[in-house]
Amino acid sequence: MARASRPVVVLCPHFAPDTAPTGVVMTRIVEELVRLGHRVHVVTSLPWYRQHRVEDGWTGRPWRTEVTQWGSIVRVSPFAGNDKANIPRRAIGFVAFSVLIGLRGVFVGGAHRRAAAVIAMSPPLTLGLTGWLVAKVRRGPLVFNIQDVFPDAAVSTGKLSNRRLIALAEWLERVSYRRSEAVVVLSDDLRRNVAGKLPPKHAGKAVVIPNFVDSERIVPGGTDTAYRREFAPGAESVVMYAGNVGFSQSLDLLIEAARRMPEVVFVVNGEGSSRAEVQGRAAGLVNVVFVDYQPADRLAEVLASADVHVVPLRRGLGNVSVPSKTFSIMAAARPILASIDADSQVARMIGAARCGAVVAPDDADAFVAALASLLDEPGERAAMGERGRRWVVEHASPAAVGEAYAALIERLGPR
């Protein structure tokens, strides 16, 4: 049976033109599946990631449908709340969003049509059961894509402490894994985490397919960019954190480094639930600059603007999260300073590519010392950047990731 005869239904929290990293990932996976001959129907949210509210031009309707040459895109309300740090409120919003996305997923492209597969992405974790129900109706296998293991990350950061909510989330996690035909994770660390929560006979459901980087769109460039001239004019050295400013990131390390290294400009390019708190801690530091997310077509320029990029992840989160920004930094040929668990996928990748330095999480002294060493060696920084670029081109192409998903769908086959 031809691939195009049964569509793939994708349920995801973000999709282009939304700028969320998971949206970038799923958008390109869909593009690759289409290239390989699949018809795809996407059900996602209205664009809302940048300002945590539905963007201008997309408001006024609970959902919108766009017919494409390869299928369709249905966008529904994300039920975003005003307080990004209010996890119970966000949980309610995720549930409402998951219900609405499920209803649209059942009917998208014709409810009578069987699906080649239903791909659901987490977070939010609630899309696991939503995907299972859609897969049951559409009579196709469920592929559950895990970007971050929840609730582990929220519990580890202390942002989720209510025992009842934790128990509910853990139950939902186990049920979602068991109802899936395959659970796709980004690294061996995440695979072990997920497999440990499954009965032994189902442990094989956990499959590693890493995220990718579009090395054709993100290309190396010089540091003398319009972005750097605007936000760090005259700076001799620029250190950047680019990405979500949330609970998992140890941006206190960046603030402490800025206190100790007043001659260096530190740029935080991103938004998120913890940004106001981080800005408060940086009050009075003239060498710390906060910049909002930039348009997607400026990503290569933004990344090129820094001499060193940092990836700070709190202790214990290395086996539940793989920061996708790492691949983008490597594609831009910039060295990385990662404050992360030594036995994590990111640490092993940086070691294999020899594209930066890794220090223990939350160790300010080690972080500052490693950063100073990198800034003192421009020749070695350039070599690290070149090695990182070479590694991602060889190991993390969109085509390889798309082909892995297509092969998994074909292996699972129709029900």
Image: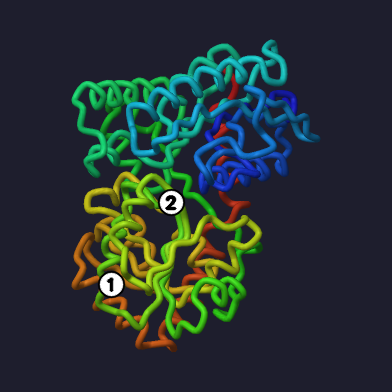
Residue assigned mark 2: 244
Identify the image quadrant of the N terminus.
Answer: top right
For this rendering, which residue is in front, 250 or 73?
Answer: 250
**Would residue 404 appear left or right of 112 to someone viewing this image?**
left
Against 196, residue 398 (above or below) is below
Q: Residue at x 37, y 83 (%)?
A: 375
**Would residue 103 appear left or right of 207 to someone viewing this image?**
right
Mark 2 vs 1: CB contact within 8 A:
no
For this rendering, which residue is in front, 179 or 286?
Answer: 286
Q: Quadrant of residue 214?
A: bottom right
Against 122, residue 127 (above or below) is above
Dot 2 or dot 1: first in sequence order is 2
Q: Quadrant of residue 55?
A: top right
Q: Residue at x 55, y 79 (%)?
A: 223
Residue assigned mark 1: 257
Mark 1 closeness class: few <14, some 14–19, many ≥20 residues within 10 Å = many
Disc 2 from disc 1: Cα separation: 19 Å
Against 110, residue 210 (above or below) is below
Residue 130, horizontal then vertical, whole percent:
49, 20
Mark 2, secondary structure of its residue: loop
Residue 73, horizontal then vertical, whole percent:
69, 31
The mark found on residue 114 in the picture is none
Amino acid carrying label 1: it is Ala
Number of callouts: 2
Mark 1, secondary structure of its residue: helix
Mark 2 closeness class: few <14, some 14–19, many ≥20 residues within 10 Å = many
Q: Residue at x 57, y 12 (%)?
A: 137
Amino acid carrying label 2: it is Asn
Residue 399 visible at all: yes
